[in-house]
Amino acid sequence: MKFLPALCLLATPLLVTADWVYTVDGKTVGSGRGPHDCASNPLRAGQKWKWNAGGTQCVLHMYGEAPEKDCTKSTRLNFDTRRPTDGGPAQTDHYFWKVSC
């Protein structure tokens, strides 16, 4: 059967990789392709975090106070990533985050 290898290949699920990844203390908090809505995953001062935009123009925004559901009316935007990769120990507490592209 010449078609058996091709059939097996078609039946195999394709691996989908994320364009960007946000991790805290080595654990993935968020990843995706394109923008991500406002999310609540607290990052405390001193915790290690890492951002990798994966070759996209996506930016991670971190908020220090409770914003509206879409993270647009926060009175305190603490941090925006400015490079494709960023990270280190957090300087302040961040309670919410979102990704824009």
Image (cartoon, grey):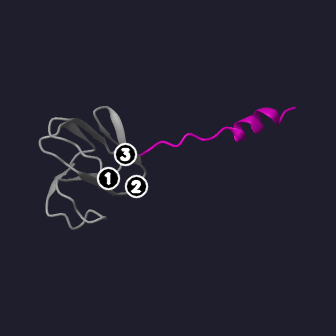
Amino acid, disc 1: Cys
How busy is the neighbourhood of tag 3: few (under 14 within 10 Å), some, or many (20 plus)?
A: some
Of the pair 27 and 20, the residue shown nearer to us = 27
Look at the numbered discs 2 and 1 and tell me whether their residues touch, using CB distance below 8 Å: yes
Residue at figure coordinates x 22%, y 51% from the top left: 95
* Left or right of 51 on screen, residue 76: left
Mark 3–mark 1 distance (CA, rounded to whole Å): 13 Å
Task: Name the residue that disc number 2 marks.
Answer: 34
SS for dot 2: loop
The quarter in which the N terminus is drawn is top right
Q: Residue furthest left?
A: 91
Residue at figure coordinates x 67%, y 38% from the top left: 12
Task: Name the residue that disc number 1 marks.
Answer: 58
Q: Specify start and end residues of the magenta stretch as a single range.
A: 1-20
The mark that comes first in sequence, 2 or 1, is 2
Q: Which mark is residue 30?
A: 3
Please tell me whether mark 3 or mark 1 is closer to you in this view. Answer: 3
Residue 14 x %, y %: 60, 41
Residue 94 x %, y %: 19, 48
Look at the numbered discs 3 and 1 and tell me whether their residues touch, using CB distance below 8 Å: no
**Vertical comparison of 55 with 3: above or below:** below
How busy is the neighbourhood of tag 2: few (under 14 within 10 Å), some, or many (20 plus)?
A: some
Amino acid, disc 3: Gly
Residue at figure coordinates x 30%, y 52% from the top left: 40
Q: Is residue 39 magenta?
A: no
